[in-house]
Amino acid sequence: MNNVRRSKQKEQFLRNPQAFEEYKRLKEKETELLKTVPPSLNPYYKNLVNSYFQNLSK
C-alpha cells in the first residue's frame, strides 16, 4: 500500500499567470478608487483614511 495523496491545485494556479496579473491589476484599480477621498470629508477622517492606506501598503 504505497498510495500517495497529491494535490493538483498548485499546478492549476501556476499554469495561468495572465489571470493572476489581471487580478492584480483589478485589485490596484479598486484600491485607487478607494483612495479618492470626497472633498466634503472632515479633515480628521481624511487623515485617518490616508494613514490606513499607508499601513496597507507596508
Image (cartoon, helix red, strand yellow):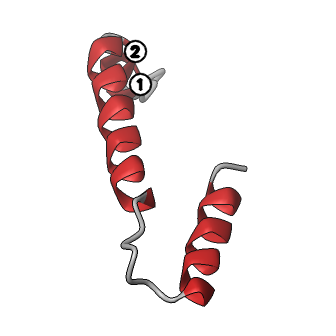
**Tag 1 near tag 2, CB within 8 Å:** yes
| Residue of label 2 | 14
Quarter of the image containing the N terminus?
A: top left
Front-most of residues 40 and 29: 40
Name the quadrant containing residue 28: top left
Name the quadrant containing residue 19: top left
Residue 18 lies left or right of residue 54; in this view the side is left
Q: Label 1, secondary structure: give it.
A: helix
**Marks 1 and 2, Cα distance to the nearest angstrom?**
6 Å
Q: Image point 29% across, 37% down: which residue?
A: 26
Give the answer, above or below, for where 28 lies relative to 31. Answer: above
Measured as percent of width and height from the top left, residue 45 is found at 55, 85
Q: Label 2, secondary structure: give it.
A: helix
Q: Image point 28% across, 25% down: which residue?
A: 22
Residue type beneath disc 2:
Leu
Q: Image point 58% across, 84% down: which residue?
A: 43
Q: Residues within 10 Å of mark 2 (few under 14, many from 20)?
A: few
Measured as percent of width and height from the top left, residue 53 is found at 59, 60
Front-most of residues 15 and 2: 15
Measured as percent of width and height from the top left, residue 38 is found at 36, 72
Front-most of residues 8 and 45: 45
Measured as percent of width and height from the top left, residue 6 is found at 42, 25
Give the answer, above or below, for where 39 lies relative to 20. Answer: below
Q: Residues within 10 Å of mark 1 (few under 14, many from 20)?
A: few
Name the quadrant containing residue 44: bottom right
| Residue of label 1 | 10
Residue 23 lies left or right of residue 45; in this view the side is left
Residue type beneath disc 1:
Lys
Q: Image point 40% across, 60% down: which residue?
A: 36
Give the answer, above or below, for where 57 lies relative to 12. Answer: below
Give the answer, above or below, for where 25 lies relative to 19. Answer: below
Depth check, mark 1 against mark 2: the one in front is: 2
